[in-house]
Amino acid sequence: MRKILISSKAFVVALTLSILSAAGSVSAQNTAPQPGSPNATSYQVDVDATKQWIDSKIDLRGGEKIKITATGTITYSADKKHPDGRTLGPEGLPRAFEDLIHEYAVTDGGHGELIGRLGSDDGAQPFAVGASLDYLAPVAGRLFLGINQSMRDAAGAKGNFQVKIEVIDPGLSTATAIAIGGPPETPVPGITPAILAAIPRRIADEQHKPGDMVNIFIIGSQAQLERVFERAGWVRVDRSVENTVLNAITDSIEKKDYLTMPMSTLYLFDRPQDYGFAHAEPVRVAMSRNHLRVWKSTFVVDGQPLWCIAATHDIGFERDQRNNGLTHKIDPAIDGEREYVNDTLSGTGIVVQRTHVTPADPLTTANTATGGSFHSDGRILVLVLSQAPADAAQ
């Protein structure tokens, strides 16, 4: 009877492994544990050409280092310009002028290149993988793999990339290392009632007409402020029409996406913004983009400058009630943009502390300077940045 039981168990294990292999799902190599097990050291993931994103089912800790290598090919359907179709490997196709207007997840990545992202929400920042990449997870999250392509590409594509993921360093098991998407919320005592009372709730236009809400504070040096936005995929916008023309031409010649279209000048503390940052897709940047303005305040919290931010999401156009011209319409549910900034910046590993605070006089409903309405729960997001050297915050 004992021999029969052993034989039956072996049969079940073999059958299970056979089914997983035939289904083309994620599998651990060399009989390693299945994805999600802290003891696994190597995985195999097949990325189907007809999909934009595949859940690897691998959860990474903050600070965990992995090596990603990929082989295989995918083929795109024939079209007028490519009557024989196109076959490519994980590094994708060289960028061409036709790639300047597209909807690829990694804006300057190769067409059809293997890509990844940590997390599945809108704030997860995609990154290029290609044929090989050593990747250090900035925060904890689920690893997704995909292909830098449009839905139209995927509809007629064939083949897959075979991706091997090896754990080089599993990282730590601290509370910070396992906190999904960034540090857990904790109070920031330096944001006092006096500071909240002194900072205006809204910014204004050149005629001092109140507009967008101040909905984010960042505590950190100028270098780390610039670093966190760069790492999160935000771009500094152009300051003038002249810069717009020059940068658009330069980017086009270099086959890069032009995403730095300027935004209007608005005022806080009676002066224009120090920075303008945007997050947008190339084909929609003119009418729809996540964007924000940044002012350095006179306040210092724990030895670091306090920056004030007004973040909004352009979703189209509407009539400017000041002059009957055309202006951008913002999403009236303004808190969504606040949390988009929270997700994108906290996912970089540079944010070491975060919280939300409610002033004594919270702003819950108002109009923009152009006349559009918005609403909020009145809270302000507070992000504290690491003061480690930039090269240490990788």
Image (tube, rainbow, N blue to C red):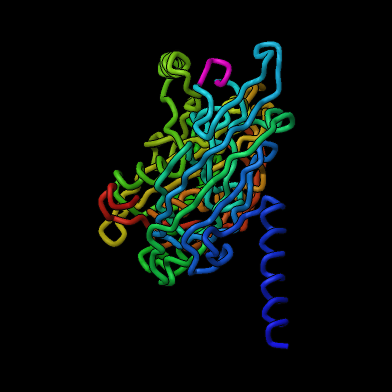
Residue 100 % position (x, y): 55, 20
Residue 40 is at least partly visible in this image: yes
**Chief secondary structure of the magenta portion:** helix
Q: Residue at x 53, y 65 (%)?
A: 32
Rendered image quadrant of residue 11 = bottom right
Q: Residue at x 39, y 42 (%)?
A: 295
- On-image quarter of the N terminus: bottom right
The front one of 142 and 49 is 49
Query: Quick one: which residue is furthest to the bottom in this view?
Result: 1
User: Which residues are the magenta region?
Assistant: 95-99
| Left or right: where 144 falls relative to 387 | right
* Rendered view: 248 above or below 264: above
| Left or right: where 100 falls relative to 345 | right
* Residue 294 is a magenta residue: no
* Rendered view: 281 above or below 186: above
The front one of 110 and 302 is 110
* Residue 97 is a magenta residue: yes
Residue 187 % position (x, y): 43, 69
Residue 366 is at least partly visible in this image: no
What is the count of numbered marks? 0
Residue 316 % position (x, y): 67, 30
The front one of 167 and 64 is 167
Q: Residue at x 68, y 83 (%)?
A: 3
Residue 159 % position (x, y): 66, 35
Q: Residue at x 39, y 36 (%)?
A: 275
